[in-house]
């Protein structure tokens, strides 16, 4: 699918994908396919769940309870396994402000051009942090 996205579309949208997987697999695959097809550099949208929290384990347990069954579907199971993960909650970017800010920056370094952020938990705390990280990045 990534090769098709790079060769035929303007880019790719991911879900439940870590920054490492974006950098190691998604970005190079989509970019190479676009180059081979003579297309412009593709956009890569990383969909991620973010929680600025003092208790990331509680957040991950909640996400696992609500979305964990998705990881049993064949396509998501393969996607998670490729990343060495067992469950979708392991892709949640959860922690204090410093941890989440660092995680967001990691997606940019990995080649993500856009972020589709779903906030869980303290919305105001997360929005404030995300806004400052993106403004620091020149967004």
Image (cartoon, helix red, strand yellow):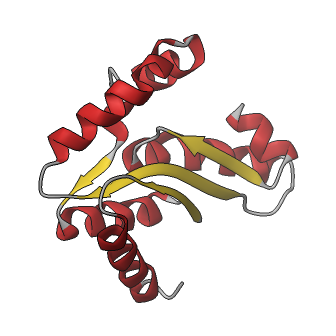
- The answer to whether residue 101 is seen in the rendering is yes
Q: Is 100 drawn above or below residue 88 in the view shown?
A: below
Quarter of the image containing the C terminus? bottom right
Left or right of 16, for residue 123: left
- The answer to whether residue 83 is seen in the rendering is no
Residue at the (55%, 13%) spot, across then down:
73
Residue 123 occupies which quadrant of the picture?
bottom left
Left or right of 12, for residue 4: right
Residue 103 occupies which quadrant of the picture?
bottom left
Quarter of the image containing the N terminus? top right
Q: Residue 3, image x and y in percent?
A: 73, 36
Q: Residue furthest left?
A: 54
Left or right of 91, for residue 111: right
Q: Is 91 drawn above or below residue 127 in the view shown?
A: above
Q: Residue 38, image x and y in percent?
A: 87, 55
Q: Residue 69, image x and y in percent?
A: 45, 17
Residue at the (32%, 76%) spot, across then down:
129
Q: Residue 88, image x and y in percent?
A: 39, 30
Residue at the (48%, 16%) spot, across then down:
77
Q: Nearer the viewer, residue 57 or 105?
A: 57
Q: Is 109 drawn above or below residue 56 in the view shown?
A: below
Left or right of 76, for residue 96: left
Q: Nearer the viewer, residue 25 or 114?
A: 114
């Amino acid at each position: 699918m990534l090769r098709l996205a790079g060769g035929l579309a303007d880019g790719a949208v991911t879900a439940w994908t870590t920054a490492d997987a974006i950098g190691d697999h998604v970005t190079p695959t989509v970019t190479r396919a676009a180059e081979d097809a003579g297309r412009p550099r593709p956009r890569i949208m990383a969909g991620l769940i973010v929680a600025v929290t003092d208790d990331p384990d509680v957040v991950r347990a909640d996400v696992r309870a609500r979305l964990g069954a998705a990881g049993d579907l064949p396509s998501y199971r393969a996607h998670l396994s490729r990343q060495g993960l067992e469950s979708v909650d392991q892709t949640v970017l959860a922690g204090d402000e410093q941890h989440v800010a660092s995680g967001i920056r990691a997606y940019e370094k990995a080649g993500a051009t856009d972020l589709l952020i779903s906030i869980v938990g303290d919305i105001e705390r997360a929005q404030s942090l995300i806004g400052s990280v993106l403004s620091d990045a020149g967004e």
